Image: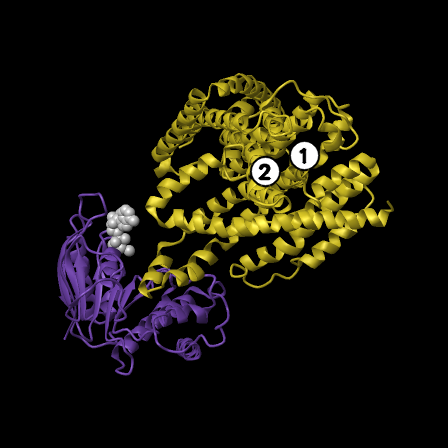
């Protein structure tokens, strides 16, 4: 194929993918707004919705993807079914941020505004249109940008997912397109990657930037002279490619992306799943209730159907193997991200530049890089899986820690300087302590992201699929793992739906147990210590 | 004529047994400017919101022109300390909120809102957002919104306390003008304030509240006509009286 043909194909692929993303974003915003407003305005709804949303966002949604495909493809004709499944999956990754954003905006509305609404007898529609919608609009835009980054990971992943599968696959998509190009050689693949990144930046400039400008129109006095319009920023981005020195280039990218990303916090982080205080007891009860229901369902299914007992024998070792990979990768991530954060947040004078660099890197989904990773690791399955785990989890940790240090008053650092606190003492008494809350929130979301990645990483390392999914590189299979199990269960010759449901139930129970006994406790201790 | 009667009103937060307001009664007549003063946190804002129908009393009742109240009514309007302008609406749209219940057509609402802004010296700022305005201008928009629906009673919760003294003085005379002008619907004003001089300068009646428990300590009547000379001996005397009550 000639270059133009490849480009045309890529643009077509990316457009199809972006159409899926926009549909998912539209649905997420509409649903997220409704649920967020409901949770913020009705005490009863708040009690039910918050814990449920809280639980749902820590469950590796991707685990449900093979199941979702299965269901959607059964219900809907193949072509629509697979697209519905992909869109559904993206929604499940996008919506939580938006719900929390709307919830917080409405919750923090000045009481006087609601009194105005009551004084002048606003009906429901006027209240939605006149107060809740404009009040949550800025946060919705901000959270949508975050959701977009997270959604891209799911988009690419789910598109690639559908490839190895003969029964259902997306016809057009940048994820599948990239894999196809990788099979033709590294040059074509890099071209595809470039198109992908152009689409990412283009969306930011042409879609989100105007929305962002609109959402802050009433907080600006006048359009400040010297403030760049998005066309100007676009010109800068194009012009930046001509700068020669690499170091200089990073600086320019950072500066421009700051224009692009103004107001957002870390690209790849979900909002931290901390249940607001009043609902904590309810949260625990809801956790226990959902856990018990899941346990009871699992027990019932297993007891009434003895063949399923055999499935458990497959599932538990698989879950164990994945568990070791996830937490092993987490240990390495921690060992890297903590010093990195201490350096770039507290020590470096260029914190902002590093943050922006990380934000750019984080907006490239790990799965897009899979062919590169596979090639550089010589197709070793375990190593590839490990790399994907790390790339998926590390940004949550870094951005989590960065976000948590933003609220530290400047005076803390002045005290440190005044009293000459330095060296190991500074690490122990200032840096690590300052990072701890962010470390925990980052760990919660990062490990959830790793579990999601396990479904992907182990899938690609499943023999028979790897050749088609990773382009040219053949990746060896991982021994066993929950992702591999889920993926293979619905392949032709797999053990089928029963095994899949058992595996899902096991995952949910495990996550709930970890949430209750590890994370909640850790969070409570930190909250107690930090007031 | 009796405009408002507050009859033995008590109020406690939901689920708490300590009363924030503990049996408060007073009456307000047509044409009166009434101030409520009292220590900070004693429940002044709460009483005003109960009168406005924004929160229900725990016991007792409020009657507006002889009738019990169910919720906010068109007869009363409210001016907030921090203006409570919706930041995402332009100034004219904010004033039009006051006309939400009116039968006027959209064009007529625009016309009326624009006239009101003009009357308060804000013509030319119709399509700006409140955030470009100074505090005094914002409160004018707030007052324009409050009087847009032609209410008879104006409730004001520390309306001038976040403004500079010069601006506050102009707005005070605007309010008095509206109260005394027969062509303008407003015929009674209740103002919560912690500024004793302001209360003595404007009020026909000053209601002094006590704290813990919150009760009516004293109701002072001032008979001299407005405008009042702040340096007059009688003015000073009245102020001393109010301070003495507050300190008691
Ligand atoms: N939303 C609330 N929650 C708990 N306490 C409140 C709330 N609003 C008011 N209070 C309490 O009620 C009392 C009266 O408040 P307020 O009417 O605002 O007083 P004032 O306007 O006289 O300063 C205060 O002691 C305050 O602490
Ligand atoms: Mg008050």
The label on residue A213 is none
Residue visible at 45% across and 27% down?
A512
Report x, y in % for residue B53: 24, 61
Q: Colour in which chain A is shown? A: yellow
Depth order, front residue of A75/A124: A75
Chain letter of the purple region:
B
Q: Which picture quadrant has residue B44?
A: bottom left
> Is residue B174 shown left or right of residue A458?
left
The residue carrying pointer 2 sits among few (fewer than 14), some (14 to 19) or many (20 or more) residues within 10 Å by Cα, namely many
Name which of mark 1 and mark 2 comes first in the sequence: 2
Task: State left or right for residue A388 relative to residue B143.
Answer: right
Chain letter for the residue marked with disc 2 in the picture = A
- Element under disc 1: loop
Relative to residue A182, is residue B184 drawn left or right?
left
Q: Position of residue A61 (x, y in %)?
A: 54, 35
Disc 1: which chain?
Answer: A
Identify the element where label 2 is drawn: helix
**Are circles 1 and 2 on residues that touch, CB within 8 Å?**
yes
Residue closest to the far bottom: B183
Q: Is residue B41 visible?
A: no
């Amino acid at each position: 194929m000639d270059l133009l043909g490849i480009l045309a194909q890529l643009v077509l692929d990316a457009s199809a993918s972006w159409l899926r993303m926009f549909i998912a974003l539209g649905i997420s915003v509409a649903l997220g707004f409704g649920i967020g407003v409901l949770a913020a305005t009705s005490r009863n709804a708040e009690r039910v919705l918050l814990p449920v949303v809280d639980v749902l966002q820590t469950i590796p949604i991707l685990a449900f993807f093979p199941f979702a495909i299965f269901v959607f493809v059964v219900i809907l004709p193949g072509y629509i079914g697979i697209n519905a499944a992909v869109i559904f999956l993206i929604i499940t990754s996008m919506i939580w941020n938006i719900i929390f954003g709307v919830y917080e905006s409405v919750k923090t509305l000045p009481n006087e505004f609601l009194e105005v609404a009551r004084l002048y007898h606003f009906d429901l529609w006027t209240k939605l249109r006149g107060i809740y919608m404009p009040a949550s609009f800025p946060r919705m835009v901000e959270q949508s940008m975050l959701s977009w980054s997270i959604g891209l990971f799911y988009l690419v992943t789910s598109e690639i997912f559908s490839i190895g599968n003969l029964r259902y696959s997306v016809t057009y998509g940048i994820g599948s397109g990239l894999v196809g190009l990788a099979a033709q050689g590294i040059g074509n693949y890099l071209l595809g990657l470039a198109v992908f990144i152009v689409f990412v930046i283009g969306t930011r400039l042409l879609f989100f930037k105007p929305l962002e400008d609109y959402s802050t129109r009433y907080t600006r006095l006048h359009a400040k002279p010297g403030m760049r319009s998005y066309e100007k920023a676009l010109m800068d981005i194009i012009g930046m490619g001509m700068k020669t020195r690499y170091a200089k280039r990073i600086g320019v990218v950072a500066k421009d992306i700051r224009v692009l990303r103004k107001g957002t916090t870390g690209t790849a982080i979900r909002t931290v799943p901390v249940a607001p205080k009043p609902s904590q007891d309810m949260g625990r009860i809801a956790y226990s209730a959902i856990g018990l229901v899941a346990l009871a369902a699992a027990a019932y299914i297993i007891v009434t159907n003895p063949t399923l007992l055999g499935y458990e024998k497959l599932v538990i070792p698989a879950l164990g193997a994945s568990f070791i990979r996830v937490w092993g990768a987490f240990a390495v991530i921690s060992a890297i991200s903590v010093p990195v954060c201490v350096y770039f947040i507290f020590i470096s004078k260029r914190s902002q530049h590093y943050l922006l660099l990380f934000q750019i890197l984080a907006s490239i989904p790990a799965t897009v890089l899979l062919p590169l990773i596979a090639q550089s690791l010589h197709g070793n399955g375990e190593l590839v899986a490990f790399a994907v785990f790390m790339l998926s989890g590390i940004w949550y940790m870094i951005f989590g820690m960065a976000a948590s240090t933003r609220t530290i008053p400047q005076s803390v650092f002045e005290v440190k300087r005044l009293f000459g606190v330095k060296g190991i003492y500074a690490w122990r008494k200032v840096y690590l302590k300052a990072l701890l809350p962010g470390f925990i929130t980052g760990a919660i979301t990062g490990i959830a992201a790793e579990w999601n990645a396990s479904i992907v990483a182990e899938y690609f390392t499943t023999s028979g699929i790897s050749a088609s999914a990773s382009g040219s590189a053949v990746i060896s299979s991982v021994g066993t793992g929950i992702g591999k199990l889920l993926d293979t269960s619905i392949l032709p010759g797999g053990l089928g739906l029963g095994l899949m449901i058992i595996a899902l139930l096991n995952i949910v129970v495990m996550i709930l147990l970890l949430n209750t006994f590890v994370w909640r406790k850790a969070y409570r201790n930190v909250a107690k210590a930090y007031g | 004529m009796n405009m408002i009667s507050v009859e033995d009103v008590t109020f406690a937060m939901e689920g708490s047994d300590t009363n924030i307001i503990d049996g408060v009664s007073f009456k307000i007549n047509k044409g009166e400017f009434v101030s409520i003063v009292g220590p900070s946190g004693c429940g002044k804002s709460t009483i005003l919101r109960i009168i406005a129908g924004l929160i229900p009393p725990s016991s007792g009742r409020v009657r507006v022109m002889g009738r019990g109240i169910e919720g906010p009514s068109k007869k009363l309007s409210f001016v907030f300390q921090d203006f409570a302008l919706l930041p995402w609406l332009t100034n004219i749209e904010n004033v039009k909120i006051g006309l939400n219940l009116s039968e006027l057509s959209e064009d007529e609402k625009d016309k009326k809102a624009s006239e009101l802004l003009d009357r308060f010296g804000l013509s030319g700022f119709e399509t700006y957002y409140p955030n470009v305005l100074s505090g005094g201008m914002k409160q004018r928009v707030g007052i324009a919104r409050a009087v847009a629906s032609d209410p008879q009673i104006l409730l004001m919760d520390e309306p001038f306390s976040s403004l500079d003294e010069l601006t506050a003085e102009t707005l005070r005379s605007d309010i008095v003008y509206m109260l005394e002008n027969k062509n303008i619907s407003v015929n009674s004003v209740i103002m919560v304030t912690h500024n004793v001089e302001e209360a003595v300068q404007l009020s026909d009646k000053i209601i002094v509240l006590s704290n813990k428990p919150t009760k009516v300590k004293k109701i002072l009547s001032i008979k001299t006509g407005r405008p009042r000379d702040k340096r007059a001996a009688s003015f000073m005397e009245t102020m001393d009286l109010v301070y003495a009550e507050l300190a008691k």
